[in-house]
Amino acid sequence: MATVFVPHGSAHRPGPVAAVVGANGFLGGSVMRALSRAGVEARGFTSAEPAVRGTRPDPALRHADVVLYLASRISPVIAEREPERAAGEIAAFRVFLETLRENRRRPVVVLAASGGTVYDPQGEPPYEELAPVGPNSVYGKAKLEQEQALVHASEWIAPAVLRLSNVYGPGQRTNAGYGVIGHWMKALLAGERLRMLGDGGSSRDYVHVDDVASAMLAVLNRVAALRSADRPTVLNIGAGSPTSLDDLHRHLEATVGRPVPVDREPARPFDRGDVWLDIRRAADVLGWRPEIGLAEGLADTWRYHLSTLREPARSASRRDST
């Protein structure tokens, strides 16, 4: 049975019904909270309660107006080491799309794609949606194949691709390869030196997870327009501005209030140069703009990591006193 989130003390607002695949993940959790606060009827699917069992969809999928596909278990590092896992995600997504033939509403299906890896690195940032694609990594190629699978299903769905930049924030995995901000904060809390790949001059587009969730929520206010669009909707979602690794390091020092030592190492073969996105079309189509600046977002994320570090310590203290 799919999980249904209802705001406490309030009824669902009339409007589109959402289904969220990957509801317990970093992005999915933020999206579910945003939908709940907005009073949206949202059915969440997880690995424990999947949207599809074999080739049979959960009945709730037949009634969804918007399907947000946020599920993924690979990172750029994992995809390079285990390309078969990337291939498996593509295959699973194709099976999922086939099951949506049973939905008579022609749902808007939103794919959380990768704005940081699909554009041709020979191009000049900021990348707009019509810029040439040409991923140079296994991860980027897998994400582009998922986009293509989504477009090929246009006969029975309304495809919407949200190409996300570098998403960060509370709840992000801190393993290496899942985002430099979470990884650096984990190192700080462990008293370790930071590890910086490359010369520090390459720039990325860091967007807070709650801003991405608000973009997903904005889709629900544009269902009719997205269904009637004469071509697949592709939108960049990011901060729309570049931040170099050296600048990010300085921002982090300001956040924690002390110098932070760093070790510099060579970039990986699949690491790209400067990448940031032109996000003007998302404002035109969805009425969406990011609201959380980098300084505010880093402070929010740092507070989260401090609280998760202290909570296990308090739990251990309580156990020791019993």
Image (spheres, rainbow, N blue to C red):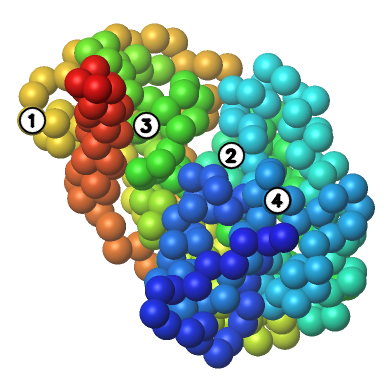
Label 2's element? loop
Residue at the image point whose x is 59% and y is 23% from the top: 77
Disc marking residue 87: none
**Residue underneath mark 4:** 49
Q: Position of residue 37 (x, y in %)?
A: 40, 72
| Mark 2 Cα-neighbour bin, 10 Å: few <14, some 14–19, many ≥20 | many
Residue at the image point whose x is 24% and y is 22% from the top: 322
**Which label's residue is closer to the chain start, 1 or 2?**
2
Seen from the viewer's position, the closer of residues 315 and 7 is 315
User: Decide: marks 4, 2 in contact (CB < 8 A)?
Assistant: no
- Which numbered disc, 1 or 2, marks the residue closer to the eye? 1
**Which label's residue is closer to the chain start, 3 or 4?**
4
**Residue underneath mark 3:** 182
Label 3's element? helix
Query: Could you tell me which quadrant the N terminus lies in?
Result: bottom right
**Which label's residue is closer to the chain start, 3 or 1?**
3
| Mark 1 Cα-neighbour bin, 10 Å: few <14, some 14–19, many ≥20 | few
Q: CA distance from mark 4 to mark 2?
A: 30 Å
Seen from the viewer's position, the closer of residues 132 and 225 is 225
| Mark 4 Cα-neighbour bin, 10 Å: few <14, some 14–19, many ≥20 | some
Q: CA distance from mark 1 to mark 2?
A: 33 Å
**Residue underneath mark 2:** 117
**Residue underneath mark 1:** 257
- Which numbered disc, 4 or 1, marks the residue closer to the eye? 4
Residue at the image point whose x is 46% and y is 70% from the top: 36
Residue at the image point whose x is 41% and y is 52% from the top: 209
Q: Is residue 108 above or below residue 120?
A: below
**Which label's residue is closer to the chain start, 4 or 1?**
4
User: Decide: marks 3, 1 in contact (CB < 8 A)?
Assistant: no
- Which numbered disc, 4 or 2, marks the residue closer to the eye? 4
